[in-house]
Image: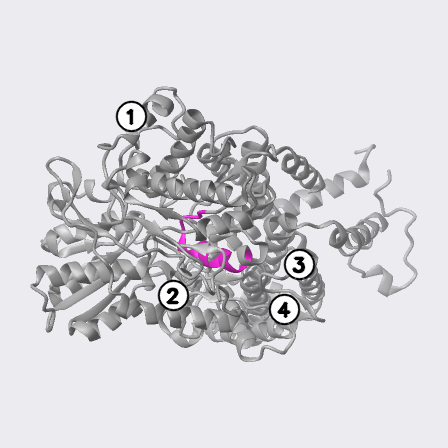
Amino acid sequence: MIYREAGDFKTSYRDDSQTFPIRLDRWGYYAILAVAFGIIPFVINDYWANAVLVPFLIYAIAAMGLNILTGYAGQVSLGTGGFMAVGAYAVYKLMTAFPDVSIAIHVLLAGLITAAVGVLFGLPSLRIKGFYLAVATLAAQFFLVWLFNKVPWFYNYSASGQITAPTRTVFDQAVTGPAASAPAKYLVCLVFAFALAWLARNLTRGSLGRKWMAIRDMDIAAEIIGVNPLRAKLSAFAVSSFFVGIAGALLFAVYLGAAEVGEAFGINKSFLVLFMIIIGGLGSIFGSFAGAAFLVLLPVLLKNTLVGTLGWPTDLAAHIELMIVGALIVTFLIVEPHGLARLWRLAKDKLRLWPFPH
Amino acid sequence: MKLTLAALATTMMVATPALADLIVPNMSYRTGPYAANGIPYADGFADYFTLLNERDGGIGGQLVQVPECETAYNTEKGVECYESLRTQNPLVLNPLSTGITYQLIPRISQDGIPLYTPGYGRTSAKDGSVFEWVFNAPANYWDGASVAVKHILEQEGGDLSGKKIALVYHNSAYGKEPIRTLEELSEKHGFELNLLPVDAPGQEQKSQWLQIRRDRPDYVIMYAWGVMNQVAIQEAVNIRFPMDKFIGIWWSGSENDVRAAGAGADGYKALTFHGVGRDYPLYDDLQQYVYDAGKAAGAGDQAGSVLYSRGAYAALVIAEAIAKAQELAGTPEITPAQMRDGFEALEITAERMAELGLPDFGAPIALSCQNHGGDGLARVQQWNAGEGSWSLITDFIEPDAEILDPLVQEDSAAYAAEAGLTARCN
C-alpha cells in the first residue's frame, strides 16, 4: 500500500536506472545517511564507537571486498585475513615513515598496495577454479602471515613483533592512537564505508560488474561473448583486495591500535569474513552490511543481554552466545540459503502486494 | 537493526553498578583455547576479593566489586571489554594477556587507569618514569629468562660455554619477548641459542621437536601458554628429552600442563614467583568464608593450583595497593590516580605476607616512581608426577640486572620517543 512503484513515474532513462527506483527505498536510504552522518557523530560515546560501530563498518568494508571477488566474480578466496594484514602493515609502514601525511591518504595507499598484492596472488585464478583456487588463496593467507612474522622490517624491528599505531590525524583531528575521539574514528570509518559502498554498487551495476558476473555464471560462455577472462578476473582481485586492504588498515590503525599478525589476521579472520558474505548474501552490497552486522553486533548484543541484564556467569554466556549464533547461522542457511539479502528482497516483494496478495 | 541498537542501549544502562564500591574488574577467559589456564586464574582472583569482602568487609570499609568480562584471549573482545569496563570507573585492570596489554597501554595512559600485569605484558613497563600507569611487579619475562639461565648455570657449575640452549616459544608478542635478553645472555655466557617458534594455538609442533631431537640442545627453555604447554611436554616425553633439562616460564608450569603427559612429565621444571599448594594459613580463612559459604568463583575446584595461587597473588598485591592508596589519600573512596600513587608507594614485606596468611609465598615487593616492576625474583619448581604436585627446589633467584637494566632502559626510551613522552619522577 505504501511501498509500491505505482504512481512513481520516471521521465528519463537516468531516473529509471537509478540505484533505488522505489521512492520509499530512496527515502529510507537518505534517512539512514542523515542519521549516520548528521546525528550519530554528535551522540556517539567511546563504547558505541570502539565496541560496536567502528568494527561493524570495518567488517562491512571487508565483506564488500570479498563479495566482489566471491559473490560477483565467483572466485572463492580464503586469503582475506592475509590481505587485511597487507593493508595493516602497509599503513603501519606508511604512517611511521611519513608522519605528517593525513592518515586517510595512507589508508588509500595501503588499499592500493594490497590491490597490487591481490593481483599477484590472483594470477593462479587464470588456471584453476573452485576448491583448487580456495586452496591457492589459503596458501596466500599462510604465506603473508608468515612473512609479516618473519621479516622484522615490517614491524620496524620492535622486540615483540607487535605493531602499534601512533597518533595520526585527518584535518588536525586525531583519528588513530589513544587520543582519537569517538566521533573522529566513527566518521573516518563511515566515510570510507560509504564511499566504498557507493563505488562497489556502481562498479557492479556497470560493464565491469557485468563481466564479473558473466565469468561467475559460466566462464567459457563469457569468453565466447567477448569477455576477457584475464582482465575480468584480475580486476576482480584488484578491486576486492583494495577494499580488503582498506578494511585491514582501518582495523589495525583505527579500531585495534595495536596488532599482532597471527592473532589479528589469522585464518579465523578469513573465515569470519567469508561467513559474513554467506550469511549476508553472495552478490549483494546490502548483504555485506547485513552479514557484518549479524556477526559483529549480535555477539555484543547477546553478551550485554546475558551478562549485563540477566547477570549470567560470563563463561556460560560466552558458550551460549556461540550456540545461539551457530544455531541462527544454520537456521538461516536452511530457511534461506541465499542469505539475509534474499530475505530482505522477499520481504520487499511481499510488501509491494500488501495488503492484497494474489 | 534499529531494534538491536535500542536493546543494546537499554542493556548498557542497566549494567552500571553502585558508585561507592571499589571496582576491580576481572578480565578473564573461561572459554577458547586458553580456557584451561584462564579459569583457575580468574577463580583465584575473584575468591581473594570475596574473602576480603566476607571477612573484613572489603578494604578500608569499602566493598570490592569484581565485575567479570570474558575476553577469550582475543584482542577484539579485549577492546569491547575495556570499553564496557571503563564506563564503570575501574581502579585497575589485569587483562592476563600480553596482546591485550600491548593494546591497552596507550589507551589506559590516555584515560588514566592503572594496569597491573604481574609476570606478563610489556617488560619495559618496569620503567615507571616512562610507563606512568603500568605496573608489572613482581617479575617480568626478561627476569624469567635470566633466572632460567642462572638456574642452568648453577646446574652446569657456572660454565655454559659451548652449551646449546633452545627456546621453544609461542609465536606472538608474548613468546618473542625473551629473545633479546637470551641473545644478550648467550653472548655473555657463551652458549648457543636456537629459536624454535610455534604458531598459535600450538597444537602442531612435531617439526620443532624433531629439530630438538636432531640438534640435541643441552637445555630447552619454553615460553608457551594454553594448549601449547601440554602438547610441548607430551612431545618432549615422546622424544625422551630429559625432563630436568626442560624449563618452562611460569606460564608453562601449571598442573593442567603436565598432567596430560602422565608419568613421563616427572621432573619437568618451571619457574614461579610465588608458592604453590594449599599449605598456607590463608586457605583456612578461604575455606571458612568462601568455599564453605558456597561463594567460590567458577566450579570451585581449583583451590591451591598454581594458576589459582597466581590469581590470588595478583589480587593480594592489588588489595595491598588499594590499602596503601587509601592510607595516602586519607579516604577509603580512592580514584584511579590515587590508586597509581598507592602502587608506587607499595611495600609488601615478608612479615606482611606472613600476616596475610601466606608466609614465604612471594618475595618482598617494594615499588617506587621509577621502579614499577619490583626485583624480579623467581624460583624453580619441579613436577612430581607420582604425587601429582609441584615442589619448590630453589630459593628465590635474582635476575641478572647487569644485562636487564640497559635493555629495559633502551626499550622504554624507544617507546617514549615513539609516543612523544618525557620522563617523569625527577
Q: Residues within 10 Å of mark 2 (few under 14, many from 20)?
A: many
Q: Which residue is mark 2?
A: A160
* Depth order, front residue of A13/B66: B66
Q: Position of residue B93 (x, y in %)?
A: 48, 47
Q: Residues within 10 Å of mark 3 (few under 14, many from 20)?
A: some
Establish whether labels 4 and 2 are both on one chain.
yes
Q: Position of residue A66 (x, y in %)?
A: 56, 60
Helix, strand or loop at label 4? It is helix
Q: Amino acid at mark 1?
A: Asp
Specify start and end residues of the magenta stretch as a single range: B94-107
CB-based contact (under 8 Å), mark 2 and mark 3: no
Quarter holding the N terminus of chain B is: top right
Q: Which callout, 1 or 2, points to the residue nearer the camera? A: 1
* Depth order, front residue of B193/A216: B193
Where residue B284 is drawn, which disc sits there?
1
Q: Residue furthest left?
A: B157
Q: Amino acid at mark 4?
A: Lys
Q: Which residue is mark 3?
A: A181
Q: Amino acid at mark 2?
A: Ser
Badge 3 or badge 4: first in the primary sequence: 3
Find the distance from the CA under tag 4 to the CA under tag 2: 46 Å
The residue at the point 50 percent across, 41 percent down is B326
Q: Left or right: A279 with respect to B1? A: left
Badge 2 or badge 3: first in the primary sequence: 2
The residue at the point 10 percent across, 73 percent down is B162
Helix, strand or loop at label 2? It is loop
Question: How would you classify the magenta stretch by its main secondary structure?
Answer: helix
Chain letter for the residue marked with disc 4 in the picture: A
Q: Which callout, 1 or 4, points to the residue nearer the camera? A: 1
